[in-house]
Amino acid sequence: MRFGLFGSAAARRGSGEFDSAEGFRDFIEYNVEAEALGFHGTFVVEHHFTGFGQVSATLNLLTWLGARTRHLRLGTAVIVLPWHNPVLLAEQAATLDLLSGGRLDFGIGKGYRYNEFEGFDVSMDEADARFEECLDVLLKSWTSNERFSHRGRYWQFNNIIVEPPPAQKPHPQVWMGAGSERSIRDVAERGFNLLLGQYASPDDVASSIEVFRSAVEASGRRFDPMQVGVTRAFFVTDSTEERDAALDRRLHNRLRQLKLATRPDGTVHGGPDRATGDPQAVNVNSAIYGDPGEIARKLEALQKVGVGYLLINGGGSGGGERGRQSMRRFAREILPLFPDQSAVRAAE
């Protein structure tokens, strides 16, 4: 297996009484240490208007992180295309790709939180159309060596050539979040890599990977497990009490996030994985919390259903030094049990 990180930072709104950027700086140091411990990459969220300081300017944060690291892949999970000017986005992403030496993994999605669409005054009913138009212009911006114009429903550009070009050719690898069978097949048919959410059950993860595999192979391409990034929350502890407290924190955060995704009619969109059912059961079933042996058993089960690239989210640890200690134990006691076979083959 290959391991990366998934997550967010938190900044506090305040005065000179405390450092508002402390959470962002801690996040950077966490990722710098993760690179040294052998993690392959990191994927960072994009969210707005939360009230609890989640990352909003994802490419800016990753640019800072890229300057502090040498090999860590720099991923977005996900940039929500319906909110972005596609040309400005193409320029910013290509700049990061160039400066980092081709390390950008460009994750995209359509968005699911009602409060964000409401905040941007964008109808959720337009999400699909805006996504498609933004993506079309974005890919053309990265690959066109000639000037072009675009007259779309939402965007118009006249006689432009977008600079700079990205380092990766023809463009950075695109990752796309999906959960339903239809959307997963769509990702495969586009030739993109797949991102699966952290609340999907292990059985749903297995089904999603099989759908993606069959769609990739039906298109005449070879399926590689590294084309699927599967996110799991993790926390390494030998204490049952500490594990249960971490699960409670994760459940609280989940419920807080679901409120932001709730529409005025009460409809809740739980994100790309659309995990439904009892929130407590979903929480326990999807997290890999516990001692190293317990976590290793859960990873073995995921590996058996085809998971190759696991993105671990340490949010349940509460962050800070406790989160760093949990990541260090994961790297020291668990990573060696699941070697990255693709890296081994490359070395051979």
Image (cartoon, rainbow, N blue to C red):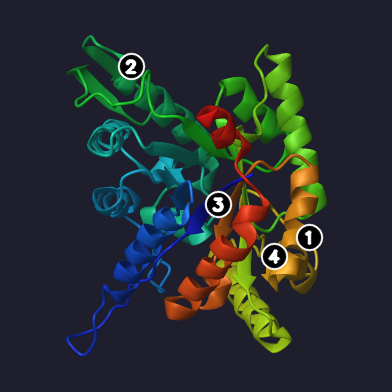
The picture places residue 118, in percent across and down from the top left corner, at 44, 57
Does residue 42 sit above or below 180 in this rendering? below
Q: Which residue is mark 1?
A: 297
Q: Quadrant of residue 32?
A: bottom left
Amino acid carrying label 2: it is Thr
Amino acid carrying label 3: it is Tyr
The residue located at (29%, 27%) in the rendering is 166
What is the total number of numbered labels drawn onto the structure image? 4
Secondary element type, mark 2: helix
13 left or right of 9 in image = left
Does residue 207 sit above or below 44 in this rendering? above
Secondary element type, mark 3: loop
Q: CA distance from mark 1 to mark 4?
A: 9 Å
Q: Which residue is mark 4?
A: 288
The picture places residue 155, in percent across and down from the top left corner, at 32, 29
Q: Which label lies toward us, 1 or 4? A: 1
- Identify the mark nearer the N-term, 4 or 3: 3
- Identify the mark nearer the N-term, 4 or 2: 2
Q: Are marks 2 and 1 in contact (CB under 8 Å)?
A: no
| Nearer-the-camera pick, 174 or 289 | 289
Q: Are marks 4 and 2 in contact (CB under 8 Å)?
A: no
The residue located at (69%, 85%) in the rendering is 239
**Seen from this angle, which residue lies furthest front?**
348
- Identify the mark nearer the N-term, 1 or 4: 4
Amino acid carrying label 4: it is Ile
| Nearer-the-camera pick, 67 or 271 | 67
Indicate which disc residue 143 carries.
2
Q: Which label lies toward us, 2 or 1? A: 1
| Nearer-the-camera pick, 253 or 63 | 63
Indicate which disc residue 112 carries.
3
Q: CA distance from mark 4 to mark 3?
A: 25 Å
Amino acid carrying label 1: it is Arg
